[in-house]
Image: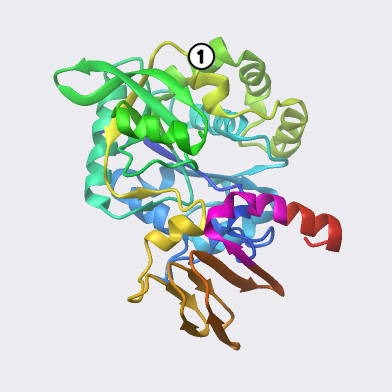
Amino acid sequence: MTLKDKTYCVIMAGGIGSRFWPLSQTQTPKQFLDILGIGRTLIQQTFDRFLPICLPENFLIVTSEEYKDIVLAQLPQLKEEQILLEPARRNTAPCIAYANARIKKKNENALIVVTPADHYITQEELFRANITRGLEFVDSDDSLLTLGIKPHRPETGYGYIQIGHEVDNSFPNFRTVKTFTEKPNFELAKVFFDSGEFFWNSGIFIWSLTTIQKAFKNELNEVYELFEKSSDQLLTSNETEAIKDIYMSCPNISIDYGVMEKAKNVYVQTVDFGWSDLGTWTSLHEHTKKDESQNSILNGNVLLYDTSNSIVHMPNEKIVIIQGLNDYIVVESNNALLICPKSNEQQIKQFVADAKTEFGMK
């Protein structure tokens, strides 16, 4: 069996992308939007990116029940059974455990790549070469591998991985992991950046099914046992009810906190292939066409005066004139308007929560 034959790609697509509000809302999260204006949504781009190294039948999309139809519409190459529907949001560990249980029914010797649905990659050939090398690494060793992105600036919006020593001369960019750190403040991010020892945590993982199952059993046994007990219900007419019962009992916990920070066999592949998680309007601004004042107008009939370093997305039917803004986000969608300094964009989640409370916004 070739590497491609036994490689499975798990795309996590259940988030609501609230930091991209108001363009990304509960009914249409950012992974299902053509946010870059290139004719393909983010989840479609992710599928396209992995297709050369993974057979179409070996893709699994883990998403919320409410997004089933939109996934099938955007990825018609997939069968309904390849869409794993979560009845509740429980973070990444249960999501991955569900995919593991399904893959085990198909191929106990599988290699797995886990990726979010909404990343942006500029150097896709290099990306695939790195992923293939990672698959070769986990195929020959009992390892949990994560991809660490070489940082280009102090960044407070990403988690960090501190690298240790080189693992093997034949895998020169593969290192042990010293520490995982959640999103730091700017001062700490600058220390990380200046040290050269810290890489951005991409949220992309590579491992064999055997290794990740063993890690769940050892480090997050509660979740492991829930799926093991109901494994005979998967791919039957009872699966939906079984998964509802499992998720009722599942803790809300990330794979990083539940497994990766505890396991002893965790490694990082240090890479630099033009990555962004497109988690914020500022990160999108970096990857879009700009005018001479570094403004990005993504949509709408917009005239800017004395305005710089800003990102604007407005409905096509509106004529919009903006004067005197620097480093701002201006976005209107679905009868909601956001005007916010880029420096405050980490507060957008709170803005959305407040709007839901105050105005009953969905």
Residue 255 drawn at (x, y percent)? 54, 27
Q: Which residue is mark 1?
A: 262
- The span picked out in magenta is 339-351
Residue 7 drawn at (x, y percent)? 35, 35
Q: Is residue 218 visible in the rendered structure shown here?
A: yes
In the rendered structure, which amino acid carries the disc numbered 1?
A: Lys
Residue ID at (58%, 34%): 92
In the rendered structure, the answer to whether residue 188 lies left or right of residue 48 reads: right
Residue ID at (57%, 28%): 97
Residue 63 drawn at (x, y percent)? 60, 46
Choose between 158 and 108: the one closer to the eye: 158
* 145 to 317, vertically: above or below: above
In the rendered structure, the answer to whether residue 216 lies left or right of residue 334 reads: left
* 217 to 348, vertically: above or below: above
Whether 342 is among the magenta residues is: yes
Image quarter where the N terminus lies is top left
Choose between 134 and 25: the one closer to the eye: 25
In the rendered structure, the answer to whether residue 108 lies left or right of residue 256 reads: left
Residue ID at (84%, 55%): 357
Choose between 345 and 2: the one closer to the eye: 345
Q: How is the image coloured?
A: rainbow
Whether 221 is among the magenta residues is: no
* 67 to 322, vertically: above or below: above
Image quarter where the C terminus lies is bottom right
Residue ID at (30%, 50%): 274
Which class describes the residues within 10 Å of circle 1: few (<14), some (14-19), or many (20+)? Answer: some
Residue 289 drawn at (x, y percent)? 35, 71
Residue 316 sits in quarter: bottom right
Label 1: element kind: loop
Q: Residue furthest left?
A: 169
Q: Magenta part mainly helix, strand or loop?
A: helix
